[in-house]
Image: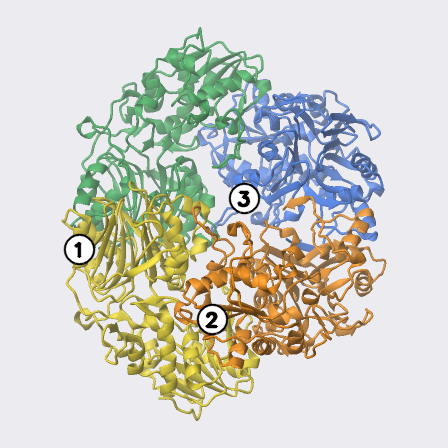
Chain colours: A green, B yellow, C orange, D blue
Amino acid sequence: MALQILDPMSVKVRPAERDEPDDDHFHDQCGVFGVYGHTESANMAYLGLHALQHRGQESAGIVTSDGAQLYAHRSMGLVHDCFDAQSLSRLPGHIAIGHVRYSTAGASHIKNAQPLAVNYELGAMAVCHNGNFTNAEAIRISLERNGSIFQSDSDTEVLVHLVAASRETTLVARITDALKQVQGAYSLLFLTEDTIVAVRDPMGIRPLCLGILPGSKDAHVLASEPVAFDLMGAEYVRDVEPGEMLVIDRSGLRSLRPLAPEVPHFCVFEYVYFARPDSQIGGRPVYEVRKALGKQLAIEQPVEADVVIAVPDSGVPSAIGYSAQLQIPFELGLIRSHYVGRTFIEPQQSIRHFGVRLKLNPVRPALAGKRVVVIDDSIVRGTTSRKIVKMLRDAGAREVHLRISSPPTQWPCYYGIDTPTRSELIASNHSIEEIARYVTADSLGYLSFEGMLNAAAGNSEGIGVCHACFSGRYAIPLSEGVVPARRQLRLVGV
Amino acid sequence: MALQILDPMSVKVRPAERDEPDDDHFHDQCGVFGVYGHTESANMAYLGLHALQHRGQESAGIVTSDGAQLYAHRSMGLVHDCFDAQSLSRLPGHIAIGHVRYSTAGASHIKNAQPLAVNYELGAMAVCHNGNFTNAEAIRISLERNGSIFQSDSDTEVLVHLVAASRETTLVARITDALKQVQGAYSLLFLTEDTIVAVRDPMGIRPLCLGILPGSKDAHVLASEPVAFDLMGAEYVRDVEPGEMLVIDRSGLRSLRPLAPEVPHFCVFEYVYFARPDSQIGGRPVYEVRKALGKQLAIEQPVEADVVIAVPDSGVPSAIGYSAQLQIPFELGLIRSHYVGRTFIEPQQSIRHFGVRLKLNPVRPALAGKRVVVIDDSIVRGTTSRKIVKMLRDAGAREVHLRISSPPTQWPCYYGIDTPTRSELIASNHSIEEIARYVTADSLGYLSFEGMLNAAAGNSEGIGVCHACFSGRYAIPLSEGVVPARRQLRLVGV
Amino acid sequence: MALQILDPMSVKVRPAERDEPDDDHFHDQCGVFGVYGHTESANMAYLGLHALQHRGQESAGIVTSDGAQLYAHRSMGLVHDCFDAQSLSRLPGHIAIGHVRYSTAGASHIKNAQPLAVNYELGAMAVCHNGNFTNAEAIRISLERNGSIFQSDSDTEVLVHLVAASRETTLVARITDALKQVQGAYSLLFLTEDTIVAVRDPMGIRPLCLGILPGSKDAHVLASEPVAFDLMGAEYVRDVEPGEMLVIDRSGLRSLRPLAPEVPHFCVFEYVYFARPDSQIGGRPVYEVRKALGKQLAIEQPVEADVVIAVPDSGVPSAIGYSAQLQIPFELGLIRSHYVGRTFIEPQQSIRHFGVRLKLNPVRPALAGKRVVVIDDSIVRGTTSRKIVKMLRDAGAREVHLRISSPPTQWPCYYGIDTPTRSELIASNHSIEEIARYVTADSLGYLSFEGMLNAAAGNSEGIGVCHACFSGRYAIPLSEGVVPARRQLRLVGV
Amino acid sequence: MALQILDPMSVKVRPAERDEPDDDHFHDQCGVFGVYGHTESANMAYLGLHALQHRGQESAGIVTSDGAQLYAHRSMGLVHDCFDAQSLSRLPGHIAIGHVRYSTAGASHIKNAQPLAVNYELGAMAVCHNGNFTNAEAIRISLERNGSIFQSDSDTEVLVHLVAASRETTLVARITDALKQVQGAYSLLFLTEDTIVAVRDPMGIRPLCLGILPGSKDAHVLASEPVAFDLMGAEYVRDVEPGEMLVIDRSGLRSLRPLAPEVPHFCVFEYVYFARPDSQIGGRPVYEVRKALGKQLAIEQPVEADVVIAVPDSGVPSAIGYSAQLQIPFELGLIRSHYVGRTFIEPQQSIRHFGVRLKLNPVRPALAGKRVVVIDDSIVRGTTSRKIVKMLRDAGAREVHLRISSPPTQWPCYYGIDTPTRSELIASNHSIEEIARYVTADSLGYLSFEGMLNAAAGNSEGIGVCHACFSGRYAIPLSEGVVPARRQLRLVGV
């Protein structure tokens, strides 16, 4: 698929580079964490969310229970900004769930921060959710017709309403009742005064795993990724299975199967980009998968070059694999700043938007006069890749060959990942040649679909994984073939 | 009713003065403000709420509409702390409602801050409320049985659910439908994308008035007290009448009468204590009523004394009236600090709780060696009066005669005023002699019930006013004779 | 001196009312507080500064010593905003001095906040100062020529340099050495690791008094006004005498007289305006002096009227005296808001600057249709008086007669009070008739110079008091007849 | 030097691991930045400091001049936390200097934040400093004897006093006069109303370089490292030479040589650890030097292993060099969190201090069952290395061989790097065998002194570099052989 570009400028550049969205990556919806049976449950949740911070940087929240009452704290920002000793001390109890949420450009949306916590007929309930309900809007309209009031535009609130409105008499029955009405991807944690309920959708699209705290058989932890267990010294037990519901209360842990089983479709993009490289997902170490993607990419898209570099951090393991396969030296060609906050004041007269240059800086001696292969995990809009290529050339690279450790991303995700619309995905309406010209690379090569599946799923047919963002073959049929619209709510602010 | 105390110490003093609640006054629930038709509606609301700050110091909030969308900002604290130039600039639009809420000792309850704003079937809606629904808890239980979810423990949220659940098709019809199901006292402002609806309960228990902004026939303002109009130069038009509903939208102002009329029962305590002295309520200037209360108190409870002083600020007009009637000089015997914030750090080894001494300080030369009459508007628990009497004696007062410009407060209010339970109201279970001994005054005299009614209502039967806190004769019968309990919600925090 | 105004509009009004400075009062430089021998010295200082808050609202600071080291905390804002439990807990030790500073319109000037604390040859030293050195600028230039560096534009820093540069070997000798080089008004508190030194200038222009904490002979307190002792239960002992130096350390309290005695000149304006009405200054209760000023004003400037009202808070005692003398009823014609913070957001399209209207509101029933005498303590620029007169007329006053309980303020103060320049003092370049016309009062009357002196100083010659702001007869001759200029420092910010 | 450890536990472990300082690296004193001739000088300084953030995370400050006045803002924290749009907008002018300062464990020391800015005889002056004056304390004592007052415990303030006290009449002459009295390492930037002066000490111990902004011959920039120029698009011109003084004002740039020339001694540790890998220092790319250090380390200290990993970020280039030399695969064995803030709340019952585990996490698949070589740049106390070795073993590493890309660090730095005392430097009082046992590595190998010098200085004698921290041969003789003590100031707080 790689090809030499003859005229790098013949692809029309979009007008104002300054206004282009700069972050060229997808955003995950969130990460979830739960703990049952630790006297410092809020502190445990804080540690867990810290380790899951990469899954969402917009807001963080924890709700605890002391057996009689729920205590909530949610705030905009990173985990270590949202919580301090005082706010954690106001979250007593031995049960907790927590949530980190992805970063958006918009204004403060504290109402969308999770865990969502409400009072309903049976008492109080808090919920946190990683994923997306594809039929939420239809249910919301129907609920509103029956008089329901919505505080947020979150699809999670729809589920809470369904639980509250269920005629069943137990929490488990009500949750089951509600889940039967929704479609989509979800890893959910429910908290009541005395119980945690964890559920993973029947296809297991989003990850969720179970661990145990040292020194107790009954102190369970739940998290989107097992890295959340490391800091607190908890031990990974197993993944929650697709369609499984775990109920943890005073009588211990029970596993239920309230939902009809379906063919598993684990999100392949967790391997490609989202999960931490030190995580394991679905029993497979992410680092190994990424190295394998890099090796396969080297086999499919080799190039004569002097150095292999990565777009840090997500591209590093694939670059190491690529380098090893072709025996081209791996170098630190780009470094990533540790000090990029959420806001950065740019000079008014600046002729260009800083964007990615605040995060990445080239290391000239690794690049100058060299033929450079740069490995990234994916291309979304192409604007960041374009800036990176320019940055490498400005630093003296003689040739810049861009290699992507996944196939072209052509389709939006409706299962919990914040993707742009199809029209914004450069690969959905441009050929690889056009993309290469747009990003001004000397050559561009994507990993093949089959190559990715072999490395990530262990088979070339895509069995067991959801690959809709690459293939357009959606695991869950969208109702009437229509893209689920996010309704424009009429209320802004706190 | 006044009597000389023989043994001021024979009433058993409650054990630890340190732990006694110190603020001896009732708290009003809140103040409301609305504006329709001004390009700087949020700024107008800010000014209005500033003028109504005395009605609530716990939280403040404003919701605006630009015709298409609602914008909300609510925060804990005083109006000038809750809002700054930035937060006001994020509240665009020509329509606004705002709210100030009373101060409580407890933790931060931002969820109870108003205006409450939600999304429902017809769009977005915000509500603010001064008053209390006496049957809210019963309705809440019934709504929860039908699946409703509650975010707060506010009775206002119950009303919002009723509006959302109504089968009527217009906002006005839905509000009417909802109001027919609730009982209690209320001055309400509703805001939607294009409309303000103001309603006052059929008895007119809580105040609400209408004004007009200069330079426009259509720019209307609404407020709990007309003093809210002064800063912005708006003109007082009239009180909203008991049971009246005003609808203000693009087609102007309409007055509706959706509720069956009842005998008016305006809260007499607004005259005695709550309203600002520069306000007028029900067409009567508060200052004049308070002076009349003081004059009548002088007629009923005269005392030979050298000076008349007031407990500032609420006691000043009555003290002036008392002084004028008996021709005893009025002096500034107590001054009130302008610098008392919400928190004050006390020395750990302090032998006494500072309490009222942070707010009030005696002016020795006005007191030393003198027989002092001190005028206050009411006695709640007696602890503050006790401290004031001690403070005056320590400053050299030879005699301290306490005169109260209202009858003994013996009954809790269920119509929007935060009163302690009966057992905490000292007058509900102690004789005047006992109270006098407890507060250690040389004599204590209350205004008679009839005296108060004559001065405040213009008749001695209490026609037109609610006087339940003095008489126990509640204007709205409590369902099944049961005191409406505030349900303990299970969820705390943000 | 009172006269009827024929044409209230014939005095040219200054162009844009919007831009006129609104606060028509002088600002005191500051208040000081010290404590020696209490384990919670920082908390004591906090209480003392709270009581002295009226003397300065711009910044507050406390420096403590635990015998070995000094601990400092200074901040912009009111005392209860500057300090919380945490910041107080970081100020250990049994010795403390504290300071409140006046409010200015400008930006944050934390560098000018006091106590000033430095390291010098003998260790660490902190100083706080109420007053002004009239020859500070000359000394500063000379010090700079010798290489001194200045951090602030405070004249106090000049003194600190003189102490540091002295060749004497003890603190007391160095302070004496330094004080012999400065001229002006000062009440000073010095703190070192183990000592407090208090000094009052030889004329005793600014106040300073000594108290003792209960339960210990050795726990001394010092404050600008004795009201600072009330909250902590300390007992007033006596004023520090003009020219006296008190040294408090492990060996107890010593009184020294290092400076040549001079004729006392206590600031008469403390009686007229600055001190709290519940204070006593120079052994005389402020409240009594102010009532006497009001009585004398009534004798000199009577008027036929229906009511006497005060501009709160400072005008109240004089108004009570005026009312009593003429037997015209005293009424609450203006109320003052408790909720005015340092910043207030005004609507952009507002046609007028809110200014004094945020602080004061008229009480219509006390004014409407009445002939009103309004008592204020002084007129600075005239703009506030003008707004108050307009406010009273708008509230329905038939006539408005302004009476001032002091003579015309014509001269700036160089001894510690923040006055405008002569050209801004309306009385220094306008006749009383012109002022009356400018403020649009029906009549205007000032207290006579002799009348003030009799009431405030007990003699008509002004013996014992400084009255330079009224008479231009400065107690301390200004060097070469030149007004001491405040040098424009070249450095702004923190 | 490497050796197999027989009994990893026979070195006595210091008692409480919990209390051990965790960050095992030196702290650089600071980074400096200056700009002359750009209308947005404060924004330029902000960009420059952002790029120099790695040189100091405790505080940041900028002082600007508009030609007539200086404007300062300094604050504790990271650059993007210290400055926002508002604070930058309050720093007008076309000249600016800025400073970042290292992180300490202690309380807030805003007084030590730079640039230091003062008023002195010639006007205002601000200074920022990277380095350390070795005779500062002696000068301070002498200055204090002459009456100088010190605000901070910074040695920079000593220099400012010398400039202020100089009898010379021009700024340049005064600075020269002052510099002749001090000894030590310094890269200094002075700012006055209209001038920037940059000076580098005669040995050039600390770095400083000059750049030019695009579009103007006169818009100069100065920075500790040329990476500070990248974001703003400035071009690196050259290093400021040892002993050179640059004066930039309206008449352009002048180079002066006011100080006697000395043999250059550039800090070798900038290559080893401090400088950013994408920087160049003394004309040599840091990345290349580090790779060369790694290659030489591989030659001197080879080991049979399966993988080479780095302690990120500083160890990465050396690890790549080591890996390339021995042809052992480089892997991502440790990842570093981007989300570690300054404070982190740890559970109270936690059995261990988190320390380095918050920053680093092992990547199990890269380690499990493998013989691992881990490359770090240096060992300070050994506690972090110990934790890293344990972390790698817990992740399954079969063997852990620690290789250090510099010789043992045995001597404190007195030239601007915050090192612990000798007794805390593990290599100053332990053999390599003991250190290896303490850190529990299977083997430990340091780079040889000559090896480091060859790679970093291009010669094995150490000509041109300061290597005192490795050799104890101090470039500047310490006065009387005494270690310069940091005087304990007696004043704490703001």
Vertical placement of A221 versus C177: above or below? above
Asked if the residue at tag 2 contacts the one at tag 3, i.e. Cβ–Cβ closer than 8 Å, the answer is no
Residue situated in front as seen by the camera: A333 or B49: B49
Vertical placement of A86 versus A115: above or below? below
**Residue A469: where, in percent of width, then height?**
31, 24
Which of pointers 1 and 2 indicates the residue nearer the eye? 2
Q: Are marks 1 and 3 on the same chain?
A: no
Q: Which residue position holds label 3?
A: D342
**Residue C15: where, in percent of width, then height?**
54, 50
* Circle 2: element type: strand
Asked if the residue at tag 3 contacts the one at tag 1, i.e. Cβ–Cβ closer than 8 Å, the answer is no
* Circle 3: element type: loop
Figure disc tally: 3
Q: Which residue position holds label 2?
A: C372
Task: Locate residue D145 relative to residue A231 in the image: left or right.
Answer: right
Residue situated in front as seen by the camera: D328 or B309: B309
Q: Residue B176's mark? A: 1
**Residue B31: where, in percent of width, then height?**
34, 60
Asked if the residue at tag 2 contacts the one at tag 1, i.e. Cβ–Cβ closer than 8 Å, the answer is no
Q: Residue D36's mark? A: none
